[in-house]
Amino acid sequence: MRIRLLGPVELRAGTDGFASLPGAQRRAILALLALRLGRVVGVDGFCELLWGERPPASARAALQGHVAALRKAIAGTPFVLHTRSSGYLLAGPAEEVDALRFDALTARAAGQAGLGDHAADAEAIALLEQALRLWRGEALADLPDTPMRAAVVDQLGEARTAAVLSWAGLRLRQGSGAAAVPTLEQNVRTDGLREELVALLMRCLHQAGRPADALSAYHQARVRLDHELGIRPGPALQAALAEVLSGDDAEAPVTARPADPAGPPAAPRVPRQLPRRPVDFVGREPEGRWLDRECGPERAGDGLALVVGPAGAGKSALVTAWAHRCAPHFPDGQLFADLRGLDPAGPADPAAALGGFLRALGVSEAAVPADRDGRAALYRDRTRGRRVLVVLDDAADADQVADLLPQGPGCAAVVTSRGSLEGLVAADGAALLRLAPLPGTDAVRLLERALTPDRLRAEPAAATELAGLCDHLPLALRIAAARLATRPDWTIADLVAELADEQTRLPVLDADGATGVSTELLLTYRRLSPGAAELLTLLAVHPGREVDTLTSAALLGADPATARQALGELAAHHLLTGAAPGRYGRAELVRLFSAGLLAEQPEPRRRLARERLLDYYQAALSYGGELIEPGQVGFGTPAHPPRALPPAGGIRSTLEWFHAEEPAIRALITATTTDPGRAWRLALAAGPLYYASSRFTDWLTCLRAGGQAAERCGDHLAAAQLYGARANVLLGLERRQEAAEAARRAVAGSESAPGPEGRSVHARSLATQALITAMLGSATEATRLASGAAALAVETGDPGRLAVALVHHGWVSLLAGDRQGALRQAREARELLPARPVTSIHLWSMLTEAHALPPYGRGETADLAWHQLLAGCEEAGLLYLQAIAEHSHASYLLSRGREPEALDRLRSALERFQSHDRLAGVRSEFTSSLEESLNSRPAR
């Protein structure tokens, strides 16, 4: 033996015996390397062991110094310390490390004990005694007290306890249980809450002819369980008590006998199969409390929990950390199975997992049934009446899990999966927890733990940005931290700059190509049906963070039902998350993964996906735009007409749809360079919805991009239309001179355009120019332009376009002081349109009419006009128009001497203008004048 860890850490370098290395940190480094013999230990692992959560800035330099000293210390031994890119590796014979030799001896003993005959049991006892003699006290006794050291010591201690239990059980089976009593008493003194230890001590005392002492051990355990855990003795202790009270002769030694193939060993086995406690686990306190409520000792649920979530969210880490914390409440053992739900080689066989569980519960190999049903029945029998915790990690589906659920009411099971496993929820009543990425503060804490607090304090903003680029996923955060830990000359900002490049972000977040975000996402992708896989690929052309059913149907060239099924499957695998009914959000890393999939497709297929998406939005915007403002110039039938459009539920529902889709629409207009014809059509079609939703600055951005696209196409009529729309938005932004110039260019560009479409565009351009000219004070010229626009609109034969021209003419007449003309034109415009639904043309004409009514006529008529206008504005939800209407109504009320009513209306108008300004990205003159007016009036 050269390295001893099962006690104080010691090294025997020469022939003079074992010696303690100088420095607790140096001993800790040797211990970690020896425990992971033949494997690379990362720098972060050493920092965690030596300093816990707060390694000093000099940690790397100190580590390098200790490693150099260790190389000298192990010279002349069979061990060699290698440097690797991500850490260090100790190579050498495992039998020269006591902890590893202990593992080998206990494994050999388990093999012998499973044979079930007297000679094999004797050999197993000898092997276990040899293994237990390697212990010289608490493992790693002289190392720094850090969370990682505690986790390792706990793991080694569990292995020692398991060996003691196995050894004492074999002694009992051989009839020499008395020999195990001193060791069991010592273990019970230090771990008296472990019921299987106390139960085995009771049986050995009973076999040794000491029933009174056995009963005393039971009562001491019962009192301690009640005082410290608030629970009653479990099945193991109760069975031992019944055996002692029965007075059965347990003193005679058991002679050699054939194994009973159907029965358990005399000593119960208590499995401790949980994986190593995660050492860098942070946060998840609410989720831990949820698991307590569903599966803890005082649970309110049925003891079956399902934890699902996206790749890299930390499902396994959460459940493992919680299981370690709650392990004392399950004294009959903890079972664990990796079900490999996404393994390319296929998921784990439930029958094989059942076999492993049965052997862990003490069933001999010969007694394990051959078929799955038989194993499931025996497993239910062995867990009935016991308190066992079962963790089933990475389940593929509900059928794989069904037979692995324990039977006893004192048992609990926690299942993790990347799929939704709806059958487990529906059929077995599993409580469902959807695990989201870490909150921002916890994501930064994880980085802090993996790096150093000083490093994060030096760059707090960069650390927050790094967490965001990792989508707050623990897997991505750990990989990013490891990248920084192995590059001490890098700043966090350096890594942020590298990850900011969308082309390289996913490759950077793949650790050595073996594990990483892309790898995990690929495993999920391979589980998808062809339809869902195709949709995930095609969604790469969609620039938004959310997608809906109709957009997905357009991308697939399918009906909404097909798209809905594919979206549901993607959501079930947590590649999308439900944002609202029919809408799904997606993480940025998933979007980049989709982009990688799309890049592998032939160019014709990529182009088809883009065209389908643009054609869908053009059709949907044209449909919604006509609903808001009739008389739009059409764009013809798209090459790829969608099978379904958003339902026409009125202007409000149309604007709600636009609010959700606007970021994607704007991105498509401003970023589409390969298809300028569709880009300018999209910019024009979106106009009424941008205007109705008050997003003036965003609208202007789209119109500029659309204008550039029209110029690339050489389409002069399209350019004229876009200048006309730009004039409208500039007018709304109160940039009247710029609006006048844009209107002039729109008129000039459409003046000689042929055909009905050319006349329609020119009529609209003239109407816009007329209104702006009137607002700039040239009433006569404005009237001439408005009349020309109306005459051209008549020639088009389209009632909607004529209504638009008349509404503009009405406002020009009003500004010119012609109230009768304004009243006539407003009413004619409204008569051209159906009474329902109410559109912006209706409302503008009603506003013109309310203004045009004689100021000193019958008040009832004017009041009714204003009431109808405001009711229509409220129904439609057009914020800007509603603000103007309320402001105008307040002026009317003041003219009638109704000041209290007017003040209430002014305050309401101010609130609406302020809301409009936030959306429009500009502070309007109306807002300033209203604030000044209200502030100058005495408060009521």
Image (cartoon, rainbow, N blue to C red):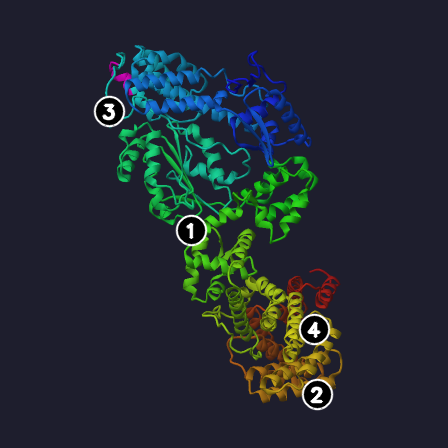
Q: Nearer the viewer, residue 604 or 882?
A: 604
Mark nearer the N terminus (1 vs 2): 1
Judge depth for marks 4 and 1 and give the one in front: 1
Q: Do tag 2 and tag 3 residues touch (Cβ < 8 Å)? A: no
Between marks 2 and 3 in the image, the one whose residue lies nearer the viewer = 3
Q: Main secondary structure of the magenta part?
A: helix
Vertical relation: 772 (above or below) 17: below
Quarter of the image containing the C terminus?
Answer: bottom right
Percent position of residue 559, x then y: 42, 66
Q: Earlier in the sequence, mark 1 or mark 3?
A: 3
* Residue 185 percent across, percent down from the top left: 40, 14
Residue 527, labelled with which disc?
1
Q: Position of residue 860 (x, y in %)?
A: 59, 78
What residue type is disc 4 on? Leu
Q: Which numbered mark, 1 or 2, is in the foreground of this view? A: 1
Question: In the image, 852: left or right of 129?
Answer: right
Q: Nearer the viewer, mark 4 or mark 3?
A: 3
Badge 2, how many Cα within 10 Å: few under 14, some, many 20+?
Answer: some
The residue to which callout 2 is attached is 784
CA neighbours of label 3 inside 10 A, class few (<14), some (14 to 19), many (20+): few
Most foreground residue, 14 or 890: 14
The magenta-colored residue range is 242-249
In magenta segment, residue 115: no
- Tell me the CA gap for discs 2 and 3: 110 Å
Q: Amino acid at mark 1?
A: Arg
Q: Which residue is mark 3?
A: 260
